[in-house]
Every structure is written in C-alpha cells, then in structure tokens.
Amino acid sequence: MQDLLGGFKSFPELLKSLNENDPAKWEQLGHALIDRNLYKEAEAVFDALFRLMQKKHGNVGLPAYNRGISRFLQGRFREAYEDFRLARQYDLHMKNLGSSATRAINYMDETIFPTREIIKKNQAQLIRELNAPRQVEYKMGANVLRTIHKWNSASPLFSHGLSQGGGYFLTLRNGRGEVKGIAIDPGYDFFDIFRGLGLGIADIDAIIITHDHDDHTESVEGILSLLAKYNDHNQEKKSKVLDIFGSSGVLLKFHGLLSATDLFGNKEINFKLLVPGNRVAEIENQSLMEKYGFHIHVKPAYHTERWTNQESSVGLVLDTNLVLKNGERLHIGITGDSRFVEGLGREYSECQVLLLNIGSVEKEEGKLLNQHLGMLGSINLLKEARLGKPLLAILTEFGEELAGKRETIGRIIENWAQPMNSGGSKNLLKVIPADINLEVKLQELAIRESDTHVFFPYHLIEVDESDTEILKYRFNG
C-alpha cells in the first residue's frame, strides 16, 4: 500500500488528490488496489469515479462494473449484482450486448445465488435433522444388536457391491429404564447405514472402539462433527455428551478431538481407555450398569494398531443386566480383530453371544493368519470358549474374496467347532455369518427373518446366500 501512496501520508489524502480530468489514473489505482487484495480501498476509488462520471454524464458503466468486482471480492454479492446491473444498463444503452457485466450477471444468476440457496436449504435440513427426537426406542427397541458390518479393511479399494459397512449398534435398557444406544467399531459408511434405519446423532449415547484401523473408526470423526453441530443448534440448548471407550491407538488417533467443548465451554466427550485385563465399571463417577446396562471386561487381542505399532487392540465382554430364560445373565463377547493364540477362547467362556471377526481363510499350508482369526482360528476359539454349551456365534468382517462363500464358511466353522460326540445336534452351537441387515433380540436370543421380519430362535435360522451381495435369514423350523 505504501508504494501506491506516493508522497501522500494516507489513502484518503491520495483519494482527494485525484484529478477529475484524468479518470484513467483512478482506474489504474483501483486495479492496483484489487491486485493487492485491498478491496475496500478499491471500492472507494471506483465509487468516487462512478459519482464523478454521473456528474459529468460520462461512462458510468466501467466504474460501476469495477466497483461491483471490489464488492464481489468482499463477499457482498447483492451489492455487486446491483453494480453489474447498472453497468449492463449503460452497456445496453451503448449497444454493447456481450459485455463483461452481462457475463457476471449470468454467472451469479446461474451459479452463485442458486448455490447459496442450496447451502441455506441444506443447513436448514441439517438443523431439522439434528433436532429430530430420539427414535431408537421406537425404530429398534431395547436389548437389540444390529450388525452394520460387511467387508474388512481392504474392501473400499476393491468393492464393486453394496456399502462396505462397519461395526455394530447395540441397544440396552439401563438401570433407570432408559434405552441407550451404543455404536461399536463404527467404520466405513456406518452413519449412512445408521441414518437409513431412521436414526440420528441423538440416538448414539456411547461409542466403543476396539482398535484404531479405519474399518473400525472411519465414521467416528463424522459422528463427533455431528455431535458438535448438535450442541451448537439443538433447540433445547442442552449439551449432549458422548462416552467413548477405546484402545491406546484410538486415544492417540483421536486425542485432538477428545477434548472438544461446546459453544459454552461444556465438555462434549468423556473418554475411557480400554486396557486388557481391566474391568470398566464406571465413567466420570457414574456406574456403567446404571447408565448403560453393562460392565466392560477388556480382553486381549493380538492385532497391531497403527498409532502404537504394537498389539494394543482389545476384545470385549459386555456383562449386561439382561437375564435370559434360563436365569443366566447375558454376556456378549466381541473379539475385535485378532489372530488366534492358545487360550484366547477361554476369555469368552461366559458369553452366550459372541461376535468373531474372521478376516479371511488361511493363505498358507499349516499357518494361521497373523492378524485375524481366519477359519481355523475361529474354530479353535469357539471350541475353547463354549465347547458343548449353547452359543450364538456371529461371524463378521469378511474379506471380500469370501463373497458368495460366507454361508459355507460359517457352516464349516459350525460343524468343526461342535463336540465330536454331539450326535449331530445343531442346538449347542450356531454360527451365523453377518451382513448389514442382521438383527438379534438379545433377551430371547432370536434373529429377525428377512422376509416376514418376525423374530425366531437363533437355532431355527438358516442363511441364504443365493444373492452374493446380501445375506438373507430364513426360518427353518
């Protein structure tokens, strides 16, 4: 700016000095100011030149157009538009039909203003959705497990089918009679699928994350972004707080987000570190059983996290408040991603429902997978965990190379994990491969049939993979 002032001490002094008989210098100065991003000063120059041309009945089109540019670059689109209209009127009077002002008006009519209206409508829709009441009790009900999981981590690079999915959604009725929603390992497209169920950010109360890989965390940042927007725009002016339980890698990956606060400085996130061997019974001095209807027993998982470069992943057993028909408390096991290590299955010996992440089948003769259970690891884990005892095993996180083979793989695991003297009974162990539409009523241990939507006991459900893209669950009574 200083080099444009010449010998003048200030911009107003320079502006007063401009010669009325030399408007070209005004234009030259205005353009130089625009080139330096000094848009307000350029506007003042072109405004003065416009008034001068009005007074002299000269060419007002050019200073109006240039003033419009300086206003446009300040984001004052309506004022710029009016300047372009003034310039076009003069151009039409002078028979200049293809002027720059006409092109600027067309650009704003066709792009700027419609886009701004779309942004306003999207913002209004977002606020409406954020303020939608909780639906979890009506859309899913209490004590339900829904898998929102399809393929494992490599799949987004190669997928040609439906959404990859990622994770699980669990609802439990807590000690106060409230239905709470818990997202577990929310990976690829989790929230899109979740919204398709008619649910929103208001329905998520907690997130549990077993390790830091993208297929288990990809949707976390989006959920936290929506949480921030919810706390900024909810009509009740009441901050929502999410409880997040995660591994060491998760803590490192998201540490910059975990201290988030709302507009008033209120805490938005409580974080609890999951360490193998620990029992997590409270968060922020509140009992988890009272708040959510479970305690967490943290189990080891032999799977390397990116952010620690160590096998700091975890498995989980959720010790719930649900009582089954036989009088037992329901225990839900989640292996997370892990290779099989002798004794790992015994960590889940109390579980009546067990979610296993298979990954793939063994790639080399005589060798188990080194980061996932695989087929043989799943068999060995199930035998260690519940040999001869009733168990609903839900097989998840398949490599996409298993498309069309999930039902067969599940049947192989089920057959070979049974006791050798079981007499062919299928009631002791049932292995159900999961897709994004699998829904389990936990207290009854019943699975929703795909066609009728009626829930049947899990041992009466068979899997139909005639469509390799989506598994169907059929009643086989």
Image (cartoon, rainbow, N blue to C red):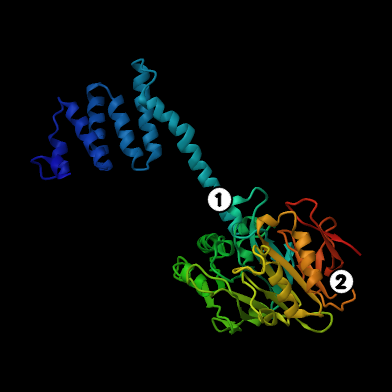
Nearer to us in this view, 290 or 133: 290
Going by the numbered disc 1, the residue's amino acid type is: Ala
User: Residue 371 location, x and y as percent?
Assistant: 59, 68
Residue most extreme to the left:
7
Relative horizontal placement of residue 296, taking residue 312 as reference (left or right): right
Q: Which mark is residue 124?
A: 1
Q: Residue furthest front?
A: 365
Disc 1 element: helix
User: What is the CA distance from the residue labelled 1 to the residue labelled 2?
Assistant: 53 Å
On the rendered structure, is 366 left or right of 234?
right
Q: Quadrant of residue 209?
A: bottom right
Q: Is residue 265 above or below residue 319?
A: above
Residue 320, image quadrant: bottom right
Residues at discs 1 and 2 in contact (Cβ within 8 Å): no
| Residue projecting furthest to the right | 477
Q: Residue at x 57, y 53 (%)?
A: 126
Q: Extreme top residue here?
A: 95
Name the image quarter holding the C terminus: bottom right
Q: Is residue 69 above or below residue 320?
A: above
Earlier-in-chain disc, 1 versus 2:
1
Circle 2 sits in a helix, a strand or a loop, which is it?
loop
Image coords of residue 194 (percent x, y): 65, 59
Q: Residue at x 74, y 75 (%)?
A: 382
Q: Position of residue 290 (x, y in %)?
A: 65, 82
Inspect the image, locate mark 2, and give the three-letter code of the amino acid beneath it.
Lys
Query: Residue at point 90% right, 76% down?
Result: 423
Q: Residues within 10 Å of mark 2 (few under 14, many from 20)?
A: some
Give the image location of residue 160, x and y in percent: 65, 47
Task: Look at mark 2 in the image and give the residue it sits on.
Answer: 426
Asked whether residue 32 is in view, the answer is yes
